[in-house]
């Protein structure tokens, strides 16, 4: 495979986009100011003046993903999840975080994380999940310019079992599959979605009038309390898996990044108003092929026979 860092179009790397340019475009799509207070979004590694020609997109900045990006010759790794969400006191390679940072630096790989800023964006992670599971007439789950979650309807009503099967086929396969709580034969049409962890949104989902709620990381106690609150009724719950429910965002994020860069280049051509964007540019991006879901297999699924 040719080295993507090697120019093939006759211009020097000094004509390329810089990391500063690309970060500005990313932050126009996913403003850091819209991220939740506890979140850590933004640039983790990289020199703002370094050239960027190839962007690698992934859900998680794992060791394997960073190595995949470096091996491909990527200049920037754009991930959904933060690398350094919780405080650390060392970046020595004895720890996984330290080795990840070191591999990125030695590989001239910048890392940028767009987490809850991408969750609440329009379009963002939740829009991608809504589209993947087949929703139309999609709207924010609650009022506000940067609302988390979406709600819409299915083209035609179907049973909860049929809908869960549709979700399973629409999302990437995982070891854990799809977990469902509710009457499998109940008819559903109005659906709420939140990509990633969503068991803190039950009240908002209930208020939306959704028949079913698709999200991930549903824990025993919050779910049990919610099912007791609704007396086993609506909204029914579908746990689609954290990685799978957010992976569907990557392809759209890639397309929007490339389109936004092209539009910005055209708008600033010859004016030099944003970094090097007045110069000839070449940018490409691709989605990681690695599955970063941590689970590898399950034993005894449905052994209890379904309804308790």
Image: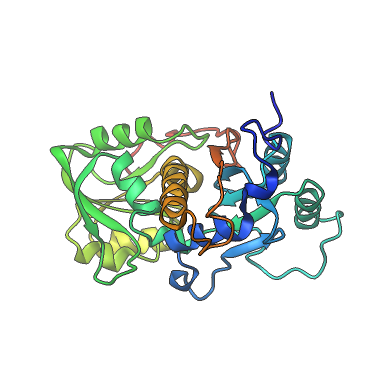
Where is residue 271? Give x, y as percent: 49, 60
Colour scheme used in the picture? Answer: rainbow
Q: Is residue 22 above or below residue 248?
A: below
Where is residue 43? Give x, y as percent: 63, 62
Q: Residue at x 64, y 34 (%)?
A: 10
Residue 198 seen? no
Front residue of 175 and 254: 254
Where is residue 53? Give x, y as percent: 62, 43
Q: Is residue 183 above or below residue 200?
A: above
Most extreme residue toward the bottom is 37
Most extreme residue toward the top is 1
Query: In the rendered view, does 127 fall on the left or right side of 55?
Result: left
Q: Residue at x 29, y 43 (%)?
A: 131
Query: In the rendered view, does 62 fall on the left or right side of 195?
Result: right
Most extreme residue toward the front is 270
Front residue of 5 and 45: 5
Front residue of 27 and 193: 27
Where is residue 5? Give x, y as percent: 70, 38
Q: Residue at x 81, y 56 (%)?
A: 95
Query: In the rendered view, does 201 fall on the left or right side of 258?
Result: left
């Amino acid at each position: 495979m040719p080295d993507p860092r090697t120019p093939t179009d006759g211009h020097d790397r000094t004509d390329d986009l810089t990391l500063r340019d690309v970060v500005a475009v990313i932050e126009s799509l996913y403003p850091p100011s819209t991220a939740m207070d506890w979140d850590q979004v933004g640039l983790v590694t990289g020199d703002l003046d370094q050239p960027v020609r190839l962007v690698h997109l992934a859900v998680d900045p794992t060791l394997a993903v960073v190595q995949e990006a470096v091996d491909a010759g990527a200049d920037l790794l754009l991930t959904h999840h933060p690398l350094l969400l919780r405080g650390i006191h060392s970046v020595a390679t004895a720890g996984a975080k330290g080795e990840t940072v070191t591999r990125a630096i030695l590989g001239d790989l910048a890392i940028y994380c767009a987490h809850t800023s991408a969750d609440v964006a329009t379009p963002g992670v939740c829009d991608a999940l809504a589209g993947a599971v087949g929703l139309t007439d999609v709207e924010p789950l609650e009022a506000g310019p940067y609302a988390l979650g979406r709600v819409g309807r299915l083209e035609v009503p179907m049973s909860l079992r049929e809908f869960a099967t549709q979700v399973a086929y629409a999302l990437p396969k995982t070891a854990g599959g799809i977990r469902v709580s509710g009457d499998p034969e109940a008819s559903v049409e109005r659906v709420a979605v939140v990509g990633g962890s969503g068991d803190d949104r039950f009240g908002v989902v209930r208020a939306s009038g959704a028949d079913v709620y698709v999200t991930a990381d549903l824990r025993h106690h919050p779910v049990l309390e919610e099912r007791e609150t609704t007396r086993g009724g609506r909204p029914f719950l579908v746990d689609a898996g954290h990685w799978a429910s957010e992976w569907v965002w990557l392809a759209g994020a890639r397309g929007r990044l490339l389109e936004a860069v092209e539009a910005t280049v055209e708008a600033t051509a010859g004016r030099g108003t944003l970094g090097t964007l007045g110069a000839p540019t070449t940018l490409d991006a691709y989605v990681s092929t690695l599955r970063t879901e941590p689970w590898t297999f399950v034993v005894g699924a449905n052994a209890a026979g379904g309804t308790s």
